[in-house]
Image (tube, coloured by chain):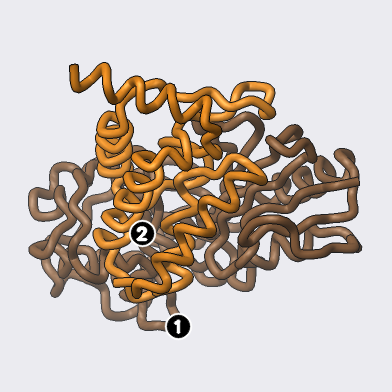
Amino acid sequence: MISVDDYRFLRESLIEDTHHDFVGLWVIPKWIESIAPATEPEAVKSTTIRLVRELLEEGLIRAGYPSDTGDEFVQWSVPVQQVLDHINAEWSRLGRHPNIGEVVWFDVATPQTARGVRGADKQAND
Amino acid sequence: MACECGDAAGNTGNPQPTYTPPTRVSQVPTSRPLSFLTPVANKVFDVLNWATSPGVQDVNHGVSGDLDMWWNFVWSVSPPGLESDVGIGPNMRDPFAKLDRAMGGNVSASGSYRTGRQVAGVSQLGLIFTPEGAASDTEIIAGSAGRWATETGGGRGVLDVSGTADDAQAFFARVAEQAQRSVSPANYPGRMVELPGGGRVGLRLVSKSGPPTIDINVQGLIWREFKFVL
């Protein structure tokens, strides 16, 4: 299991990196395993999902995938829980940690895009 | 490459040989027999009757011994001069179980297997033979790189390369020549290949910040992106 400091570092790294480029889900388990190589695969997965949940709920990142042209981000306007369910299901289906381009990507959330995500959550709760 | 076929060489020349797996540990050959598989570099063999072996259809605590037995078996039939890896799972999505002769032939590179916690339906077992001494994935990356000026880029594991889009494409082409296969995740805006060791390398000609980007997921390599910033 990674330490509180390592978790904080992961969180800051993911937020920072989404400012530079779209970040694939695969990057997070790779980071966790590089920081704490003895982490069990299930713990890697649960830590990844916990981190993604936090950042999505706080409106700091958005989930989706790069456009075909590679320079735009296609956001999933669905509730956070639906994104997490998708990640969980696809990860289980793979039977291993996600690789490049698989399951979902993340981009930094601007105030405008974050409103869209929260709006989707509100719709789901109505 | 000549086939070192023994008497059981009914599948000589068949690129998809089929054979019956041993069912008990005692049946695993203890001495090294002549192989009845045609030596083929970077070739996946399907074991078509894998799913009929009831004890090994799910990878969990109860069958770890069966998988060890398989690794021993594969090691024993590996043609001289070739190293063998074992992959399991539907459609060989992830050949994660690495057989390393130097480690005794039954050590998995997969933490998920070692802990016996991986649960997956298994209907296929693939064997991959590669020449001993073949370049590792890391060596392929290093050998394909040009004499670039580089500096740490923005982001963890990102390397900025003083190169053009042509340099990025040339690098990817050199890597692809040594790759095992092309892979195409649905949401990847570019081309991607899988290397013999299971690592993946992708080329995005355009990224969020603009420059052509090489995505890299190779075990043991700290870099995950090369950005060609010229």
Residue type of the residue flagged with mark 1:
Ala
The answer to whether residue A58 is above or below residue B133 is above
Residue A76 in the figure: left or right of residue B172? left
Percent of width and height locating residue B60: 14, 59
Q: Residues within 10 Å of mark 1 (few under 14, many from 20)?
A: few
Q: Residue at x 46, y 30 (%)?
A: A114
Question: Dot 1 falls on which chain?
Answer: B
Residue located beneath label 1 in the image: B102
Residue B186 in the figure: left or right of residue B47? right
Residue located beneath label 2 in the image: B7
SS at badge 2: loop
The answer to whether residue A2 is above or below residue A15 is below
Residue type of the residue flagged with mark 2:
Asp
- For the residue pair B8 and B221, the one nearer the viewer reads as B221
Q: Residue at x 82, y 47 (%)?
A: B228
Q: Residue at x 70, y 45 (%)?
A: B176
The answer to whether residue B144 is above or below residue A71 is below
Chain B colour is brown
- For the residue pair B162 and B90, the one nearer the viewer reads as B162
The image quarter containing residue A70 is top right
Percent of width and height locating residue B104: 36, 82
Asked if the residue under mark 1 is in contact with the one under mark 2, i.e. CB atoms within 8 Å, the reply is no
Percent of width and height locating residue A20: 67, 46
Instruction: Return the disc, 2 or 1, that comes first in the chain's sequence.
Output: 2
Chain assigned orange: A
